[in-house]
Amino acid sequence: MPPVDAYLLGHPQEHRCIQNIGGIANVTYLPPTTTLHWPQQVRGWDTGPGNSLLDLAAQRLSQGQLSYDADGAWAAQGKPDLSLVHRWLDHPYFRQAPPKSTGRELFGWDYLDQCLGEATHLTEADFLASLVELTALSIVRSYGDCLPQLPDRVLLCGGGLHNGYLRSRLAHHLPGIPLESTDTAGVNADFKEAIAFAVLAHWHQHQQPGNLPAVTGAQTAVVLGEMAPKSRASIGPTGKEG
C-alpha cells in the first residue's frame, strides 16, 4: 500500500500518516513531496491489531450474536484498564522496529484468550474499551517510536474508520492533529484497497515497479504481480465460456 498511498495522497507541505484500520492496522508515513529523495523517505509498517481483537471479542462476549461492536457503542460504555493495556503493549511486536508486518496468526483467537485471562476483573464493556485503547495506543506509540516527527495530519481508512469510539481515542492521544477520512483527499476510504490494487495492476501492465524498498527492506524496486490472461482452454466449442 505505501507506494500507492504516496502516489495518491502525498502533499507538497504536509507530513501525513495514512492510517488503515482493518483487521490489522497499518500506516504509511508520507513526508512532504518536496523533500529531497522523497520516495526513499516514505515509510510503512503494520502497527498491530486494528479491528481483529475487537471483532473477535464482540463475537465471544455476545456468544456469537454479534460479529462486531457497531460504532464502538459497547466499548464506549466501559473504561479501559490502563495498567492492563500497558502490559499488553509490552508484547515484543510493538517494540520491533520497521519494516515489519503481522496478522491474525499473532493477534487472533489465542491472543484474545490470553487477554481475557488477564482481565477477569473487568466488565465486558471495560474489556472492550481496553482492547480499543490497545489499538489506539499501539498506533500512536508507533508514530512516536518510528517516525522522524509526528504527522501534520492523519488520514484514516478501513473499517475502523466507522468506529466512533476508536476515532475518539485516537484523537485523544493525538491532540491538535487533524484526523480525517481519506475521502477528504479524494480517495474513497471504503474502497481504497480496491483502488490500490487497480493502481498496482496498472503499474504491472506498464512494467513499472510497485514496491518501495525503503518500506519493505527489499534490495531493489521490482514489478509486482503476474499477468494471468484467460486460458483458451476455458472456451467451449460454441465459442462461449465453459
Image: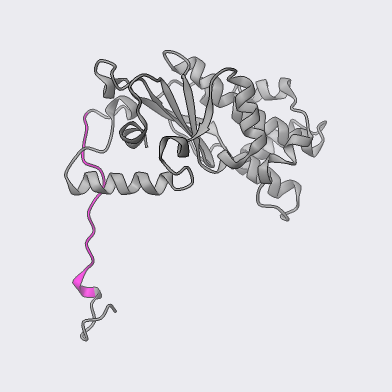
> For the point 40% across and 20% down, which residue is it?
14
Magenta-drawn segment = 220-233
Q: Is residue 226 above or below residue 11?
A: below
Is 225 magenta? The answer is yes
Residue 1 drawn at (x, y percent): 37, 37
Residue 174 in view (yes/no): yes
Q: Is residue 214 above or below residue 183?
A: above
Residue 41 drawn at (x, y percent): 31, 20
With 10 as the anchor, is 236 left or right in this view? left
> For the point 19% across and 49% down, which residue is it?
205
With 52 as the anchor, is 129 left or right in this view? right
Assign the C terminus to one quadrant of the image: bottom left
With 111 as the anchor, is 73 left or right in this view? right
Q: Quadrant of residue 69?
A: top right
Residue 230 drawn at (x, y percent): 23, 66
Q: Nearer the viewer, residue 73 or 242?
A: 73
Q: Nearer the viewer, residue 77 or 181?
A: 181
Q: Quadrant of residue 212?
A: top left
